[in-house]
Amino acid sequence: MWALYVCLFFLSILVSDFNKDSISMKKYNKNGRLIIPNNEIIANLPTDGGPMWNRLIFEKSPYLLQHAGNPVDWYPWGDEAFELAKELDKPIFLSIGYTTCHWCHVMEHESFEDAKVAELMNDSFINVKLDREERPDIDHIYMQVTQILTGRGGWPMTIIMTPDKKPFFAGTYFPKETKSNYRQRGMLDIIPEIKSLWQNKRDSLISDSKKITKRLNNLQKSMTSKNTFIDPDILKKSYYAFKKQFDVIYGGFGNAPKFPKPHDYSFLVRYYLRTKDAESIDIVKKSLYSMRQGGIYDHVGFGFHRYSTDKQWLVPHFEKMLYDQAMLIHAYLDAYIVTEDIFYLNVVNEVAEYILRDMTNLNGGFFSAEDADSEGEEGTFYIWEESELMSALGLEDFLTIKDLLSVEAQGNCFVEGKKTNILHFNQIKYNEYMDSENNVNHYNTIRQKIFQSRKSRVHPQKDDKILTDWNGLMISALARAASITGNNEYKKVCIKSIDFILNNLKQNESKLFKRFRDGEAAIDGMIEDYSFLIWGLIEMYQLTFDLKYLKEAIKLSDYQIENFWDEENKGFYYYDKNSEKLIVRAKEVYDGAIPSGNSVSAFNFIRLGKILNNNLYENIADEIINAFSYRINNSGTGFSMMLHSIDYSFGPSNEVIVVGDINDSRTTEILNAIYNSKNLNKVVVLLDPNQKEEIIKLIPFSEFYFNAQINEPIAYICKNYICDLPTSDLFQIKKQLDY
């Protein structure tokens, strides 16, 4: 055995040296990112990638491809890596991240591109790289492990585990060398120590891994609890918990860092509609306004950055994520519906402009993200020196926006250790300047000049993979925006995106793939892929009343129940019963930056049940809520998307049945009145006489309304299935729906 280790040791040195020499042969772009060869060259490489590359060169994930030129002998997650680990009797070094992750880039440059670190890793481990956005099921499990072992989580995530995937060591970012000010060990010290433990105290590590895995399984069992029901006061208790955390000066919740968790604000809008508690909507208005005016918002090209590193919303972590844009569109739409303040609708249109301009595939679908880094540093694309702005604008225009956008000669903040300017509104100057249409128009002209100047900079890398779940979120957001604004472009792009997904990311009648990139659809769809896409399909039916969207939503919902549902304890598992088996079959209900699949599923099934008058679907929603009730009752603020469903299930809610030709302008007027009502707990069914037979087949109860023999477009406003007399009076319709 020792002879084998000696051979492997010298072999790893040779490989490491060869790779070190070959690094200089690789080409890098202006962002410092590896330029990947074309598909023809890749097709002719040996299975291990050859001397210049590792096995990640054959992957489609932009994150994995970033690491394809590392001297670390990376493997993608799969049987090859785990079988080799068993054969060579080595533990697995699992590194999880995503393409726009700043600290992932830092750890790569410090450690994974370093020949000495790579030598140690190749000698000690079988090294596996994983894109958390492609495999959130795996990421979810090992993030729980990291939190159990360290009390915190984040990316890059570092897991060391046995060849059978059971973890015994976890952490996040590790520097190359141990530094006293970091108060953490470096890679050059950690790796030899773990190698020594694996060789000399293996039994202890195996025992630890079994204990951790058992604890993980117990944690999953505790996610759902039998014989518990949701607290009738949970909405009120959650509101007061949010109120307690609210930052009255800057908006948002808590201290730094601050995350723009949109579904928190959407819940508070719902709470306001339910109670008319003015403070609840004030929290929403203060927070959404502060975020839009602050540095977390890109005032030049629009869109929100990932989060703010400070409590003032000034210095962001600069990546832009598709899911943030989608959920924030929902939140700002909700605020607009209640307040009728055009400010919120303008933000919706600005974010949509960014999405349609920079994040939309010409063939359909939305890209995933844009990096925080460019030219090797975070934020370079977005920050400004005073001289740069003066050069771009000329003196007169520069003086117009200098104080308005908080520009200072020495800079208004620190980014990457240097003083610079992040553009954000000075509120006093904003109120003074933006009080006239001429000034607003002038500002927009100046902003366009800055935008054109910025186009000459090196643009952050775009993660161009198309994810089913995140696309579902964006479709749901833009479809709602289209219904409220009447913007036909939003509708067109949603239609194109859905067509792309259904044509490229559906395996058969109902089974989904997760990811599409470079002509390849791959990875079994997970709970979020189904639930988020179903959400998008429901919103598209509510916008267009095209039955194909409702039919697809039904098919996917039925597949989801059959393949993800836990019959014993209720709730949906993270992955399909026919997918790869992991060390635990997890469930998720916590609503983080992205809402959970269970929360969105509950919301979907309530709405589908009411559209179709199908008690099965509504019962599923109730069972989801009750399954996770113990956790929700104890910490409602962590489940703000689930609170949407609870609010809906508590009622009141409205079912609106419109009988009329969709091409009749009178029908359109009725629908617009419904869209613009101050009511978030409603569904609409359009009974178009031109589709009578097809509609009755899909929605049997509709036959009664078709037979009513009414000769003009008309609406039935129902509350919990009890309907008022039909009316075509637009004022009356809105009055009945507003609450």
Image (cartoon, grey):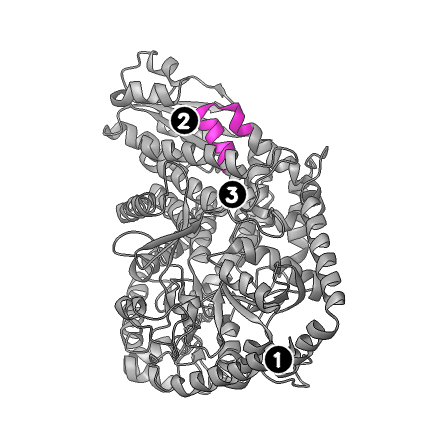
Q: Quadrant of residue 709?
A: top left
Q: Is residue 610 magenta?
A: yes
Label of residue 267 in the image: none
Number of the front mark, 3 or 1: 1
Q: Quadrant of residue 716?
A: top left
Number of the front mark, 1 or 2: 1
Contact? badges 2 and 3 (CB < 8 Å): no
Q: CA distance from mark 3 to mark 1?
A: 44 Å
N-terminal of the pair, mark 1 or mark 2, is 1
N-terminal of the pair, mark 2 or mark 3, is 3
- For image coordinates 44% across by 30% down, the residue present is 735
- How many other residues sit within 10 Å of disc 1, few (<14), some (14-19) or many (≥20)? few
Q: Amino acid at mark 1?
A: Ala
Q: Which residue, given by chain and number where applicable, does mark 3 sit on?
A: 576
Q: Secondary structure at mark 2?
A: helix
Tell me where residue 724 appears, x and y as whole percent: 46, 19
Q: In the rendered view, would you say 368 is above or below 560? A: below
Q: Is residue 417 visible?
A: no
In the visual, does 363 lie left or right of 155? Answer: left
Q: Amino acid at mark 3?
A: Asp
Which image quarter is the N terminus in?
Answer: bottom right
Q: Which residue, given by chain and number where applicable, does mark 1 sit on?
A: 3
Q: Secondary structure at mark 3?
A: loop
Q: Is residue 453 magenta?
A: no
- How many other residues sit within 10 Å of disc 3, few (<14), some (14-19) or many (≥20)? many
Q: Which residue, given by chain and number where applicable, does mark 2 sit on?
A: 732
In the visual, does 275 lie left or right of 361? Answer: right
Tell me where residue 360 appears, x and y as whole percent: 31, 57
Q: CA distance from mark 1 to mark 2?
A: 87 Å
N-terminal of the pair, mark 3 or mark 1, is 1
- Span highlighted in magenta in the image: 604-618
